[in-house]
Amino acid sequence: MENKTSTYRVEQKLTAATIHEFLAKTKYRVVSDTNGGDAVLSGKVLRMEVVAAVVPDDDHGDHQHGASDGDAGDDDLRSDIDGPRDG
């Protein structure tokens, strides 16, 4: 994963979250060696935007919370997928 923003370590956080989702929701294994997998997933974080979200609070009215939105491109994330895991 490549970070083209000024947001510190966003590419590492996105990589970790992507790996977590693959492991939690699929039967694929994630390997670090690009030659050891059947596919290579790559990406580039191009920008980060902070947007305000209004979340209703059941007891005290509405409160605003920050959220971020990032775009992922297609370069340099090398978390390889090597077929279904056993089990």
Image (cartoon, helix red, strand yellow):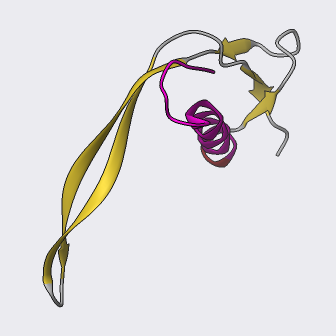
Residue 69 in the image, given as x and y percentages of width and height: 35, 37
Q: From the viewer's side, name the closer residue of 27 and 70.
A: 70
In the picture as drawn, the residue positioned furthest to the left comes out as 61
Instruction: Determine the residue positioned at 81% across, 36% down.
Output: 85
Instruction: Determine the residue positioned at 78% across, 33% down.
Output: 29
* Residue 13 placement: quadrant: top right
Compared to 73, does 32 lie above or below? below
Q: Is residue 47 magenta?
A: no
Residue 14 in the image, given as x and y percentages of width and height: 57, 36
Relative to 44, is 31 on the left or the right? right
Q: Is residue 13 magenta?
A: yes
Residue 50 in the image, given as x and y percentages of width and height: 30, 42
Q: From the viewer's side, name the closer residue of 54 and 41.
A: 54
The stretch of residues the image draws in magenta is 1-23
* Residue 34 placement: quadrant: top right
Relative to 71, is 64 on the left or the right? left
Residue 67 in the image, given as x and y percentages of width and height: 33, 50
Relative to 44, is 53 on the left or the right? left
In the picture as drawn, the residue positioned furthest to the bottom comes out as 59
Q: How many marks?
A: 0
Instruction: Determine the residue positioned at 60% across, 42% down.
Output: 17
Q: Overall secondary structure of the magenta stretch?
A: helix
Compared to 17, does 65 lie above or below? below
User: What quarter of the picture does the N terminus occupy?
Assistant: top right
Instruction: Determine the residue positioned at 72% across, 18% down.
Output: 78
